[in-house]
Structure formats: C-alpha cells, structure tokens
Amino acid sequence: MVKNAFISVRVQEKKEKNSGSVEFQVFRFTNTIRRLTSHLELHRKDYSSQRGLRKILEKRQRLLAYLSKKNRVRYKELISKLNIRESKNR
C-alpha cells in the first residue's frame, strides 16, 4: 500500500468545518476508493470489497454530477485538487 496516495483527512477536516458538504463527502469517498483499490490489488478475489467499491464509486459519481450542475467552478476545483478524471457525460 502506498502511503502517499492518500490525502490527509485531519488537514481536510480542519479546513472544512461542514463535514456534510459535497466537497467533503467526495473527498472521503475518494480516500476510501483509493484504499479499497490498493486492497484489491493484493486480494483480487475479494468480491465483497469489489461490490463495496462499486457502490462507493456510484455514490461519488452522483455527488459529482450534482455539484457540476449546481456549481461548475467548485466542481472543476474539486476534481483538479483530488486528481480525478472528469466524467464523460459532463
């Protein structure tokens, strides 16, 4: 597991006082996705984790779609900060 691949949650929690905001939720989902991805590289047949990863990916995608509709500037900043790809549908 690569330690540098994860973003510090503590730093983000101090910056972001509203843990229910869309940006913070996407941030948390991204950390979980990266952790599960590194886990699945070692344990390829862990189907429960694969299912959980797909569910989290779908949740993050829905939140990003919502954010892109509501505020395109915040959406662009978030995907560049988290280093994730923009959706093909957008």
Image (spheres, helix red, strand yellow):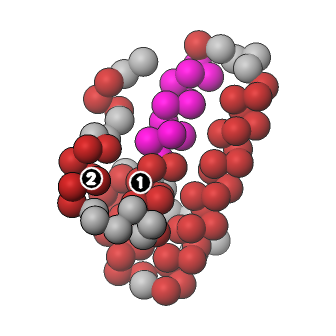
Dot 1: what SS? helix
Q: Where does the N terminus fall, quadrant-wise?
A: top left
Look at label 1 and name its amino acid: Phe
Residue 44 position in % (x across, y down): 69, 17
Residue 43 position in % (x across, y down): 65, 14
Using a 10 Å C-alpha cutoff, classify the residue at mark 2 as few (fewer than 14 neighbours), some (14 to 19) or many (20 or more): some
Q: Residue furthest bottom?
A: 70
The stretch of residues the image draws in magenta is 30-41
Residue 23 position by quadrant? bottom left
Q: Taking 36 as reference, is 64 above or below it?
A: below
Q: Is residue 79 visible?
A: no
Nearer to us in this view, 84 or 12: 12
**Residue holding disc 1:** 27
Q: Residue at x 33, y 60 (%)?
A: 80
35 lies left or right of 44 = left
Residue 50 position in % (x across, y down): 72, 32
